Image (cartoon, rainbow, N blue to C red):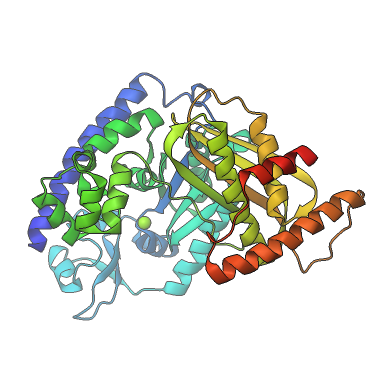
Amino acid sequence: MIFRCCVLRMKCDVIFYRKIKRQVCDAESTGFLQSPARRDSVIAMILHMDMDAFFASVEQLDHPELKGTALVVGDASGRGVVAAASYEARRYGIHSAMPMFMARQKCPHLVIMRVRKDRYKAVSRSVMAILDRYSPVVEQVSIDEAYVDAAGCDRLFGSPEHMARLIQSEIRDTLSLSCSMGVAPLKFLAKIASDMHKPAGLTVILPEQVPPIIATLPICKVPGVGKQALEHLSRLGVSTLGDIRAFKPAFLVDRMGKFGHRLAELACGRDDGQVIPNSPAKSISSERTLAADTCDREILRQQLLSQSEEVGRQLRRKGYRARTVTLKLKQADFRQITRSLTLAGPTQSSNILFQTALTLIDNLSLATPVRLIGIGASGLIDTAAPHQLSLFPETDLKDDEWEKVDTVMDRIAKRFGPKAVHRGMGTAESMIDES
Ligand SMILES: [Mg+2]
């Protein structure tokens, strides 16, 4: 059964990559991919970086005499397995998790290096330090993989595609290692893209390519679809992610629980997985995909109200005040709009966050329906740090009063849950009138 699943996956891979390569090549032949200037830089894109044959490449780096040789890293004893294989070893059909005795049979002159975790961790830190220089929002997901949020980085590094190329060059030039990168408007597609042209590949999935890619994406390529889910979905006649759309979400939830819901969302091009930085908080945010795309300002204000409360509550719980408030909108066509405002003084008041977000959204014309809305607080200052008094005492007084309200609401939320108490829209509007 395991063998059948592997064969099924390999077949899926070959068919899928041929189709995707054709779509990407079509885009290349039109010159679209080569011309960053033609790409709208406000499209929200996520980068996924994956180091190529990481452990094996580090060994080849530290032992230059082993460059170009079939090499694996792992326990050489009888019961050991391959932890990583160089690309030269992969040509013999050797892959990670293969029993070492089998790898030796496939390649008698195979070089086996023992695992040096500390060395790999040190190199990994250097790689992540490079990524940190490109974006404040980097999420390391394993020793050799990370997501990078390219939003707002275009002024410094150009298009997300150009930014990915710069990252690849810097890793190659400073560490003498190669990585593959995927660029896509959705997190799960960025990961799939980074795997498409290994090693040292760069694959860009443009927003307009998302629907055809989802329609043809083999279900086995979707992160989280394991052996069990694959068998279950095969019985339902599902072979691509697009096939999922034939089923009602309730049916999928009934059969597969929460994961069924996620599959239904992904099949419709909805992946609200954010890039979450693992370093100490640099920003706190809340964002939500709306039940239906809308231009209705009342609906958007309602969302901002609850999101301001959520972000404010987190600021207070984690002991931060924020200097900057950012409004984020993702439109139905995947274009992203972000607007920020830096406050006169740092705050942790839900009301001030809300009022600032309202100012930002009221200055936008909403011609295209909005699919996702979010609010972020950044420029965080530890509340334990000395608080500089404002030059405008009345502003501080108002803030303090609202912070008392926040404290009471936090207590109620802590005791009865976050939905137990919230500000009403009427109150919110009267708050705006006062300002
Ligand atoms: Mg890797």
Residue 385 in sight here? yes
Q: In the rendered view, does 412 fall on the left or right side of 110?
A: right
In what quadrant does ligand 1 lie? bottom left
Above or below — where is 2 with respect to 133? below
The residue that appears at 38% across and 64% down in the rendered structure is: 55
Number of disc labels: 0
Q: Is residue 161 left or right of residue 76?
A: right
Q: Quadrant of the C terminus?
A: top right
Lateral position of residue 102 relative to residue 271, left or right:
left
Q: Position of residue 383 (x, y in %)?
A: 75, 65
Q: Residue at x 20, y 50 (%)?
A: 251
Q: Residue at x 65, y 56 (%)?
A: 312
Q: Quadrant of the N terminus?
A: bottom left
Q: Position of residue 409 (x, y in %)?
A: 65, 62
User: Residue 435: in sight, yes or no?
Assistant: no
Can you say whether 417 is above or below 52 in the image?
below
The residue shown at (16%, 73%) is 101
Query: Looking at this view, is 149 or 204 the one in front?
Result: 149
Depth check: give the residue in front, 57 or 136.
136
Q: Position of residue 299 (x, y in %)?
A: 53, 37
Residue at the top extreme, as displayed: 30
